[in-house]
Amino acid sequence: MVNATALEKIVHSNISSGAPAWLAIGITWAHLLGGFLIIIGLLTRWAVLVQIPILLGAIFFIKFRQETFGSGSELLFAVIILLLLVLFLAEGAGPLSLDNYFRKNPV
């Protein structure tokens, strides 16, 4: 959210010149809200499904903009996060999640 103009430039230069202006803001808010939902364990698999395409796009852009594993590269960190997202997609929420609480205590 701090570097919204930098994200807009990346989106416009890499996707296409006709990319909508709201795309960068939508990516930012979807990533922020999805991360929050994953942390509290609410709608975990749906939040992961929203996060995976965003992270794949980030990995794609990082790969072509920086050295692969050089100093200051964020590619390794992004790949680890992607693997964790796949784990959450397969396993779902844990025992201390809101998904589990609502499953055990129906309204």
Image: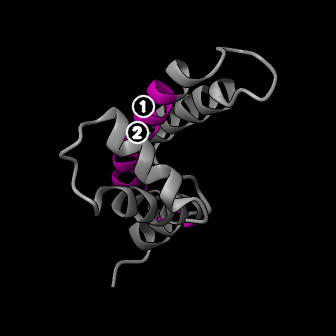
Q: Is residue 56 placed above or below 42 in the rendered structure?
A: above
Name the residue: 62% across, 62% down: 96
Camera-near label (2 vs 1) is 1
- Residue 77 seen anywhere in this rendered image of the structure: yes
Which quadrant would residue 15 be assigned to in this image? top left
Identified at 60% across, 32% down, the residue is: 78
Amino acid under disc 2: Ile
The crowd level at tag 1 (other Cα within 10 Å; few <14, some 14-19, many 20+) is: some
Q: Is residue 88 left or right of residue 78?
A: left
86 versus 66 height, above or below: below
Q: Look at the image and tell me whether residue 43 can be seen.
A: no
Q: In terms of secondary structure, where does tag 1 sit?
A: helix
The residue positioned farthest toward the left in the image shown: 18
| Residue tagged 2 | 52
Quarter of the figure with the N terminus: bottom right
Q: Is residue 50 left or right of residue 82?
A: left
Q: Residues within 10 Å of mark 2 (few under 14, many from 20)?
A: some
- State the extent of the magenta-drawn residues as a range: 40-61
Tell me the SS state at disc 2.
helix
Residue 27: percent from the left, percent from the top?
39, 55
Residue 73 counted in the magenta span: no
Q: Residue at x 30, y 56 (%)?
A: 23
Front residue of this view, candidates 96 and 78? 78
Residue 72 place in picture, x, y as percent: 78, 29
Examine the residues drawn in magenta and state their main secondary structure. helix
Asked whether residue 54 is drawn in magenta, I would say yes
Check contact, mark 2 vs mark 1: CB within 8 A.
Answer: yes
- Tell me where residue 29 appears, x and y as whole percent: 43, 65
- State the separation of the CA atoms marked 2 and 1: 6 Å
Which residue lies at the image location 58% right of the left edge and 59% below the top edge?
A: 3
Residue corresponding to mark 1 = 56
Three-letter code, disc 1: Leu
